[in-house]
Image (cartoon, rainbow, N blue to C red):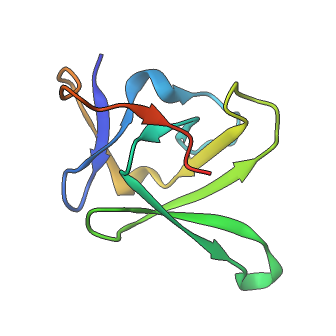
Amino acid sequence: SGFFSCRACSAPLYSAQSKFDSGCGWPAFDKCFAGSVATERDTSYGMKVLEIMCANCGGHLGHVFENEGKTPTNERHCVNSVSVKFVDEDIHDGLVEEKVV
């Protein structure tokens, strides 16, 4: 049980069940709560990745990598650990998880 919320505004972002060990050293999730994460294409430094931000406050969370075959959703949300906090409580009623892309 439990979930991860935005450290800046406390909005719920990810369930504990969506977290997985991707081997990259960063917290990784394969889906988020519907409407909780906003996206923007990031082409800085010659890369083409999808930046993820808290949809509530706009805080930077990390990036989404697609089509790696590591999860059933085929998404890896690579999240900066200082941008989220774990909440050891039941998930709020009505929150549904979905892919972000």
Q: Is residue 18 left or right of residue 73?
A: left
- Which residue is pictured at 23% across the width and 62% down the height? 8
Quadrant where the image shows the N terminus: top left
Question: Is 52 or 83 nearer to us in this picture?
Answer: 52
- In this view, 36 is above or below 45: above
Residue 99 in picture, x, y percent from top left: 56, 41
- Which residue is pictured at 45% across the width and 21% down the height? 17
Residue 96 in picture, x, y percent from top left: 36, 31
In the rendered picture of this protein, how many numbered marks are placed on residues?
A: 0
- Considering every residue shown, the one lying at the far top of the view is 1
Tell me the quarter of the picture where residue 32 sits: top left
- Which residue is pictured at 79% across the width and 74% down the height? 47
- In this view, 88 is above or below 58: above
- In this view, 13 is above or below 22: below
- Which residue is pictured at 43% across the width and 32% down the height? 97
Residue 83 in picture, x, y percent from top left: 37, 57
Residue 41 in picture, x, y percent from top left: 65, 73
